[in-house]
Image (tube, helix red, strand yellow):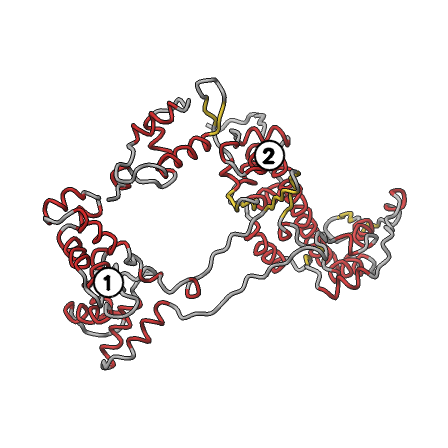
Amino acid sequence: MLHQRLQQKLLQKLSPQQILLMKLLQIPTIALEQRIKQEIEENPALDEPDEADEADEKEQDFEDPIKDDESEGENEEEFESKDSKEEFDLDDYISDDDDIPSYKLSANNTSADDERREIPFVSGTSFHDLLLSQLGLHSLDERQNEIAAYIIGNLDDSGYLNRDINAMVDDLTFTQNIQSTKEELLELLSLIQEFDPSGVGAQNLKQCLLIQLRKKENTSKATEIAILIMERYFNEFTKKHFEKILQKAKITEQDLKDAIDEILKLNPKPGNSLGETSKTNHYILPDFIIYNNTGSLELQLNSKNTPELRLNRTYVDMLETYANSKNKSKSKDTITFVKQKIDSAKWFIDAIKQRQNTLQVTMNAIMNYQREYFLTGDEITLRPMILKDIAEIVNLDISTISRVANSKYVQTPFGTFLLKSFFSESMQTENGEEVSTREIKKILTDCIDNEDKSKPKTDEQLTKILIEKGYNIARRTVAKYREQQNIPVARLRKEL
């Protein structure tokens, strides 16, 4: 049975402007430019000034002609439609855009002294194109050439063929209408495995290394033993069970060391051997830059964080024309559309400015909080810092600080780092002093770097060292910190 009752609820909803700001805060500088281009494409009322516009704006009178508040509402008008009456403060709306010179509607945050760096790009032959060019040097009929090209197309970026041969035979039948057999594909694969770079076309790491060893022109004793190890003792080699290899292969420790040196010279990913020119280069674009000016820290936002945006003058003039027209009621839909677009453009420009201010305030707080580190570059000076610490300093929500730290990079005199890497939990020493967990990780890394590689330290031994230094830490925590830094266990760090 249905009942009718009153219910009171307290809800908190974000406005569209707040949602837009939250989204802009989260994206890094390298994605901001693309986001702005997308907004300009979707909203014709938003525009980026070109050089000609900037030159015209500089010739304008820099005196602000904004009217007094008493005169802003004098020219307000009402217009009626057949179904309803609606009031549009169009004259007042126009005055917001018309009285303010266009140069005040854009954010010019660059100067002639700003350094502009262009990233040079070079062209190069792709990995697959190199293999196809070598394929053309062999006398194959059209059918074999198509099959071989199909195999090359299935190689991954590392140069491996990770697909099942039987599945490839089926694909050739259904997609290329080429009848083939497993034996034929393996024969053509063997041909491709003779191509450069050496090791290409292998189906696994073991085969890749063996191909490279067998292609060596000057076969030495070390090469022969390396081939033996790859063929018979590959699992023992990957697990660094050197004692087992010495016993089973009946070789000396020096022979094993020489063979391992030969193996270490090989390329486990031959597809990457063409260098950076044939690959897509990935560059880190810092969102913040910190300078050490004789002991005084200076913070600068990347210029792409503060792009120049303004309202499209055509749309502003269009709204003014329709607002001053005699038949306003007939132009109601057009006026509403243009007004919505201009409002949306204003919101976006304002959100970009708020984003800039939030980034500046938050990063400035982080820089001052970790002042000793940014002056010295010594990770031991890093203070424990969580999102709440910075949120309390800048009087912003923790979620806002999290969005600022997400995917943002800061360039320092000691390198470029992910901003969230400066946030770490605290741990107490024996003296009751709070230290950053990143400091402990740095000491742990130093211990491993300086250990005897023939007898690497176990997690238990590393724990004892840290405890002796005054850090109360458990073995499982040491193992966790080691794994976070991609450091293998002691057995896999062992060297002869």
Considering only vertical position in the picture, is 164 above or below 437?
below
Q: Quadrant of residue 196?
A: bottom left
Q: Nearer the viewer, residue 218 or 318?
A: 218
Q: Looking at the image, is mark 1 or mark 2 earlier in the sequence? A: 1
Q: Is residue 157 above or below residue 445?
A: below
Q: Secondary structure at mark 2?
A: helix
Q: Quadrant of residue 13?
A: top right
In the rendered image, the residue lying farthest to the top is 431
Q: Which residue is mark 2?
A: 371
Q: Is residue 323 left or right of residue 13?
A: right
Q: Element type at marker 1?
A: helix
Residues 458 and 246: in front is 246
Q: CA distance from mark 1 to mark 2?
A: 51 Å
Q: Residues within 10 Å of mark 1 (few under 14, many from 20)?
A: many
Residue 116: x and y in percent read 63, 58
39 displayed left or right of 96: left
What is the total number of numbered labels drawn onto the structure image?
A: 2
User: Marks 2 and 1: in contact by CB < 8 Å?
Assistant: no
Return the residue at label 1: 212
Q: Residue at x 57, y 50 (%)?
A: 29
The residue type indicated by label 2 comes to: Arg
Q: Which percent across, then down, holds residue 259?
A: 20, 53
Residue 346 position in % (x across, y down)? 70, 50
